[in-house]
Amino acid sequence: MENFNYHRPATVAAAVAALKKSKDGKFLAGGHTLIPTMKQGLAAPKDVVDLTAIKGFSGIKVSKTAVTIKAGTTHQEVATSKEIKKAIPALAEMAGKIGGVHVRHRGTIGGSIANNDPAADYPSACMGLGATIETNKRKIEADKFFTGMFETALKKDEVITAVHFPIPKKASHQKFPNPASRYAMVGVFLSQNAKGQVRVGVTGAAPCVFRAKDIEAALAKEFSAKAAAGTKVAAKGLLSDMHASADYRAHLISVLAGRAVAAA
Amino acid sequence: MPSITIKLNGKAVSGEVEGRTLLVEFIRDHRGLTGTHVGCDTSQCGACVVHVNGKAVKSCTTLAAACDGAEVTTVEGLAKGTELHPMQAAFKEHHGLQCGFCTPGMIMAAIDIVKRNGKNVSEEVIRRELSGNICRCTGYHNIVKAVQAGAQNM
């Protein structure tokens, strides 16, 4: 790994200032994507700004209508939060399926979302629940946040501070994990709110997380496992690799959406 | 270069590290504690698992500088003199190792599992929670037995 200047600011403002000053800087949270990427030489930032020492950067707050998770909260904290298990059990379950427990002890929600790996789990929860991502500058709807493969709407000097998830009436997360990496070959996060609106966030299947609009439309007419599983998803544009073809992934989306409705 | 102080196995140790110095490099190369192993160096195998502030983490995927002020426990910090930690004793008793390369990480992971799940942690939970620790010779059965037995004595 190339060496870098390490910064450990105590406030968000100091973190942003440190990154602004650098020609080629990166924010670091749990480091479970950035450090392996740097080891492989795929990233070699001159400055690394560690966000984990910022005071008040992690924590969970649940109101009657929303779950707010601060950016530095680890996957394990979300997976074991009694409040989240009560408000949105599917969200806690999803966090508990990320990597292994050692990874969950370090990895954070903010890091996962900012990285927007095509097979990461949190982006599907953000899309499937209609989350709002809060930064040091603004609030961004999930639908406008994830813009492409490892791409987001974040500006260079913008840092995620919290994610707000509206509490749905029903939700479920279904994941077909790659047995070696535990990343989603396909993951589906489905929710239905009190007004009956259905959202289906899909990860692992395409270069970027997306909503399965055809399945959402079918479920708006009839909220049943059969309606979800019976909706064919187009394979065009989906990922094809040594683990699964695009056709296989397309089929998995419908199957997992059906299971999600049954489990919600 | 960042200057760090870590409470390593109960003793405060200080040192200068590079930004890129991994926690496992600090433990092995700077402090000479070679019980913590590097198997894959890609966050997969778990041979490098140590406890940071009481939580099992992969020290090959953690910066030493990020652990400034933290309490770190490695496999060397478990025994009391010549008396093995109950989990170490259980691995010996139940033949939870063959070549032993993965064992330090297994034992650190096992203690973390018992701390979070209690003495009567089920076989299913042990197997699931050891998913981040890879062993290529035992076939896991004796490791699981050792964790169950060690849990009872912790």
Image: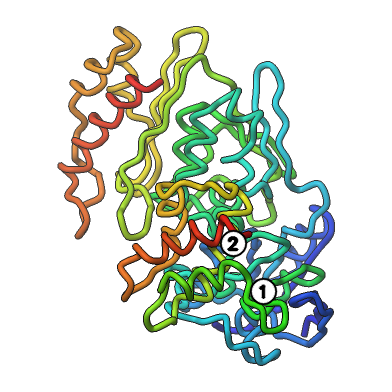
The coloring applied to the image is: rainbow
Image coords of residue A121 (percent x, y): 45, 44
Q: The disc labelled 2 sits on which kind of residue?
A: Ile
For disc 2, the neighbor class at 10 Å (few under 14, some 14 to 19, many from 20) is many
Determine the CA span between mark 2 and mark 1: 10 Å
Rendered view: A196 above or below B64: above
Image coords of residue B110 (percent x, y): 53, 62
Rendered view: A39 above or below A72: below
Q: What secondary structure is found at the residue carrying circle 1?
A: loop
Is residue A146 shown to the viewer in this render? no
Q: Is residue B48 left or right of residue A205?
A: right
From the viewer's side, name the closer residue of A130 and B46: B46
Residue at horizontal 70 percent and vertical 89 percent from the top:
B31
Q: Which residue is mark 1?
A: B78
Residue at horizontal 48 percent and vertical 76 percent from the top:
B92
Residue at horizontal 72 percent and vertical 77 percent from the top:
B80
State the quadrant of the N terminus of chain A.
bottom right
Image coords of residue B76 (percent x, y): 65, 81
Pointers 2 and 1 within a single chain? yes
From the viewer's side, name the closer residue of A202 and B91: B91
State the quadrant of the C terminus of chain A.
top left
Residue at horizontal 61 percent and vertical 51 percent from the top:
A108
| Image mark 1: chain | B
Q: Are marks 2 and 1 in contact (CB under 8 Å)?
A: yes
Q: Which residue is mark 2?
A: B111
